[in-house]
Amino acid sequence: MIHSDKNSLLLSTGLGLKGVGEILSSCKSTEEVETKLRDFGEKYLKRYNLFKTYKDGVFAGEIKLPLIPIISGMPGAGKTSLAREVATAFGIGDVMGGDAIRASYRELISKEEHPEFFTSVYGAWQFVGDGKETEENIVKGFYLQAKIMNNLMERIVADRGIRDGESMVIEYLHFLPSQYDSNILNHPSVIPIVLRVDSMEEWRRRIEIRDRISHLKGNSQRLIPALEKYRMMQDVQCEDAKKVGVPVIPSDNMKEAYEKIMNIIFEKIERIIETKDMSAENIEKIKRVMEERSLNPDKK
């Protein structure tokens, strides 16, 4: 199994497959691996040692804080692709996609009470204010959908992530830090990141090729006329993130964006190694989770 092999630690360095392959084919010992990593650059060796320290601490039962990157952005910003890269690098098996969760939740939520949740995010303006397609209503419609999605995703982060200690990568469109409990957002395990596309030309190109890469039924072209609305929502999301110190990363160049994401994650890993564990009793959602779990037969 790849991620139970000690050599899988090399994936966390951010080196490409060619570099990892070169190390594996030429190095026989840990010392040789470390020397080779230093030849590629000190940052790769530092990442290797940091993630090894984290994993050793986890396996020893000393570190009980998982890794929970939250990667957000509009369609075409690269959140799904970058989430996969992060999950592969750190051996994280759970990648939560907001589109699937939103589709599932439509089976449970009332369409009469929340009609704005049953349309595209760029069409939610129909159910806001005077129902006119204005920038104000487009933004308000986004906030309404986001409120529901952030409540759902925050529950997953609090319950399965912080409470149970499960590492996971979460990627979804609607992330607005202001709609999160600050105790969750500032938890050492939680690593929120917002992606931003600056070039409309690059943005359009990515939407145009989605049907050949990930959305094979050809439904992505409907997003092109909505790009201006997405730009409005992107501006709101980025401004919201900046107000609370959540990193906003330009993703026009995906390799550069990935490198910045890796730097952010390793900054958090350093903090986790120092912290080791943290009580979450002050988080309201976790209090509710504990009350619910008290209903389990083994808790009675």
Image (cartoon, rainbow, N blue to C red):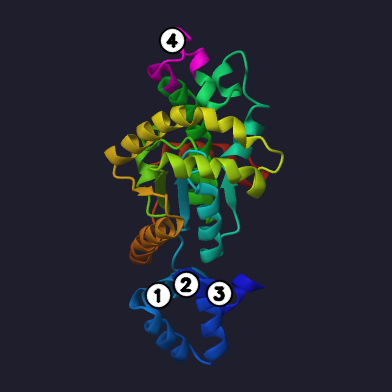
- Does the residue at mark 4 contact the one at mark 1 (Cβ under 8 Å)? no
Q: Please state which of the two labelled residues, at mark 1 or mark 2, is closer to the viewer.
A: 2
Secondary structure type for disc 4: loop
Q: Is residue 208 visible?
A: yes
- Does the residue at mark 1 contact the one at mark 2 (Cβ under 8 Å)? yes
- Does the residue at mark 2 contact the one at mark 3 (Cβ under 8 Å)? no
| Residue at position x 50%, y 45% in the image | 157
Q: How far apart are marks 1 and 2 (CA)?
A: 7 Å
Please tell me which residue lies in front, 171 or 269: 171
Q: How far apart are marks 1 and 3 (CA)?
A: 14 Å
The stretch drawn in magenta includes residue 80: no
Q: Can residue 114 be seen in this view?
A: no
Quarter of the image with the N terminus in it: bottom right
In the rendered view, would you say 53 is above or below 71?
Answer: below
Q: Distance between the residues labelled 2 and 3?
A: 12 Å
**Residue under pointer 3:** 8
Name the residue type under label 4: Gly
In the rendered view, would you say 134 is above or below 235?
Answer: above
Q: Quadrant of residue 87?
A: bottom right
* Magenta highlight range: 125-138
First along the sequence among labels 4 and 1? 1
Secondary structure type for disc 3: helix
Q: Which mark is residue 129?
A: 4
- Expressed as whole percent of the image width and height from the top left, the position of residue 195 reads 41, 46
Please tell me which residue lies in front, 103 or 211: 211
Name the residue type under label 1: Tyr
Q: Residue 44 carries which label?
A: 1
Q: How many residues crowd mark 4 within 10 Å: few (<14), some (14–19), many (20+)?
A: few
With 97 as the anchor, is 62 left or right in this view?
A: left
| Residue at position x 44%, y 60% in the image | 255
Name the residue type under label 3: Ser
First along the sequence among labels 4 and 2? 2
